[in-house]
Image (cartoon, helix red, strand yellow):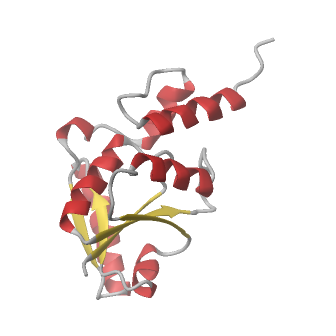
């Protein structure tokens, strides 16, 4: 059974991420969408919130499992018997960094391969960072995230907005 691990912060999950999950779900028997808990980063959403948003965003894809993890991605893959790490590549600038990670992961755990997928052309410019910035300025993010994620962004940013009184 071919299983792919798709790790990321998913803060928040975007339609570009969902596009990769859809395509990976056709290539692999199971896709494990792994929400990273990286204490060094300051995410907008907690791991639990990000997992719930991911669940809502990929609810129509049967062979996807959502998990949280901390530590080295390649170690998570090794300890869970997963042989493939899936990474999205939007531009050449992504490739250089991802290529280095793939090489290091191969050195650490030679049995785990990295597979790169490019998103659909309409998502090549899309990132979670841009979505957060647009949402923070009350921009419409509905083209970039699923409805459940847009609602969570509005709720979170409304709660964090300074009182206008």
Q: Nearer the viewer, residue 145 or 103?
A: 145
Query: Residue 54's x, y, as percent?
Result: 46, 51
Query: Residue 137's x, y, as percent?
Result: 54, 22
Q: Is residue 37 above or below residue 138?
A: below
Q: Is residue 53 at all visible to an observer of this figure?
A: yes
Q: Is residue 58 above or below residue 99?
A: above
Q: Is residue 25 left or right of residue 101?
A: left
Query: Residue 81's x, y, as percent?
Result: 38, 86
Name which residue lies at 71% across and 30% down: 159
Q: Is residue 5 left or right of residue 150?
A: left
Q: Nearer the viewer, residue 59 or 105?
A: 59
Query: Residue 7's x, y, as percent?
Result: 41, 64
Q: Nearer the viewer, residue 12 or 134?
A: 12
Q: Quadrant of residue 86?
A: bottom left
Q: Is residue 6 above or below residue 158?
A: below
Q: Which of the image's four quarters has the C terminus?
A: top right
């Amino acid at each position: 059974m071919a299983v792919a691990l798709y790790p990321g912060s998913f803060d928040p999950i975007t339609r570009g991420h969902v596009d990769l999950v859809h395509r990976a779900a056709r290539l692999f028997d199971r896709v494990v969408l792994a929400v990273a808990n990286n204490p060094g980063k300051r995410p907008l959403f907690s791991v639990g919130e990000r997992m719930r948003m991911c669940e809502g965003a990929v609810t129509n894809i049967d062979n996807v499992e959502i998990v949280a993890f901390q530590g080295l991605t390649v170690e998570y893959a090794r300890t869970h018997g997963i042989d493939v790490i899936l990474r999205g590549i939007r531009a050449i600038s992504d490739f250089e960094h991802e290529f280095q990670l793939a090489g290091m992961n191969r050195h650490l755990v030679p049995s785990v391969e990295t597979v790169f997928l490019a998103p659909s052309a309409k998502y090549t410019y899309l990132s979670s960072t841009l979505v957060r910035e647009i949402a923070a300025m009350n921009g419409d993010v509905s083209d970039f995230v699923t409805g459940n994620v847009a609602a969570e962004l509005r709720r979170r940013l409304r709660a964090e907005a300074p009182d206008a009184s």
